Amino acid sequence: MMREDNIYRTSRSERDWSVAQLSDYNIGIVNVDAATFFGRAIETVALDEVPESVLTCLTSDDIADDEDPGYDLLRFHDIVMNGGLENTVNNLVEELLRMLKFRGQRRIILTCQRLPLTMCGTSTTAETDVCVQNNDNILLLVQEDKAYRNSNDPEPQLVAEAIAAFQHNNRTRQRHLRKEPLLTYTFPCVAMVGSHARFYKIPVTQSLNEGVINGYKPLLETKVQCFDPLENNPMSGLGMAQLDSRKKIMQSFKLMKSIMLEQAELLL
């Protein structure tokens, strides 16, 4: 049997997902260290593609050259840290992904993409803040915590987006590629609280997907791994405002790219 209970559940958009939905669908989030999450220490990751200014200048005001390739990222970061304009975190993430070469080889970076989500027998939606896409497949998801006061808010939304992306990718496989749907896929995901990034690996299985589609609790728990590069840092709320923290976050993003590319091989 695939279901654990007979509790009635209702459909809701990704924006309305909370920790209650994680419990409803037997999803747990576990904090892990870098070795468990990435298989290596983040400090060993080289950032050769990152302009020196990004690793040495605190703000864009410290850049003397108007044509410095790191200016845009630091300027977006300045705006975020000063209260920000709406969607500036998305601009920051998009520039960071571009700098670390998430874009290229048919991969593109998209913002504010609305994905259909089938839940409890009805259609609703999930909207990504930023995502990486390749040949109409979703490869990576980024969600901003717009509340800033509740750092757990992005987690349920990220899970909903991953399930919507799983459904989207399988529709692409079946309709356009004439391939069998994947039974499982692990999405690399990022939650942004200001410029502080937390990293997730969200496995979506056939059991979880069917539970959400039909509104029942899967018997098997889905375990989501979470890695915070600034864990135990009392200044983590400053995100990338501190140079050492900025380097750790960028190193973690680069390792997420490796996970993204490894998982993308399953879509071929």
Image (cartoon, grey):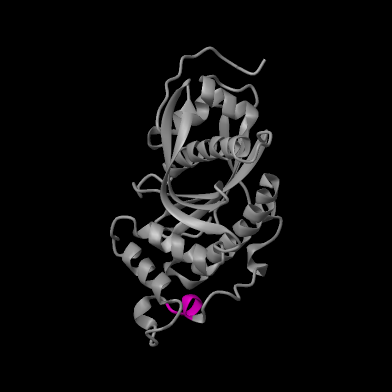
Q: Residue 112: where, in percent of width, then height?
A: 39, 49
Q: For residue 95, which quarter of the picture?
A: bottom left
The residue positioned 39% from the left and 83% from the top of the image is 63
- Asked whether the viewer can see residue 132, the reply is yes
Q: Residue 159: where, in percent of width, then height?
A: 51, 38
- Asked whether the viewer can see residue 235, the reply is no
Q: Is residue 56 magenta?
A: yes
238 to 5, vertically: above or below:
below
The foreground one among 71 and 137 is: 137
198 to 220, vertically: above or below:
below
Residue closest to the far bottom:
64
Q: For residue 153, which quarter of the picture?
A: top left
Residue closest to the far top:
6
Q: Check the picture and name the quadrant holding the N terminus.
A: top right
The foreground one among 80 and 11 is: 11
The foreground one among 135 and 158 is: 135
The foreground one among 260 and 252 is: 260
Q: Residue 8: where, in percent of width, then height?
A: 46, 14
Q: Is residue 5 magenta?
A: no
**Span shown in magenta:** 53-57
26 to 106, vertically: above or below:
above
Total count of labels: 0
The residue positioned 43% from the left and 82% from the top of the image is 68
Magenta segment, prevailing SS (helix, strand or loop): helix
Q: Is residue 195 left or right of residue 171?
A: left
Q: Residue 254: where, in percent of width, then height?
A: 60, 63
The residue positioned 65% from the left and 26% from the top of the image is 220
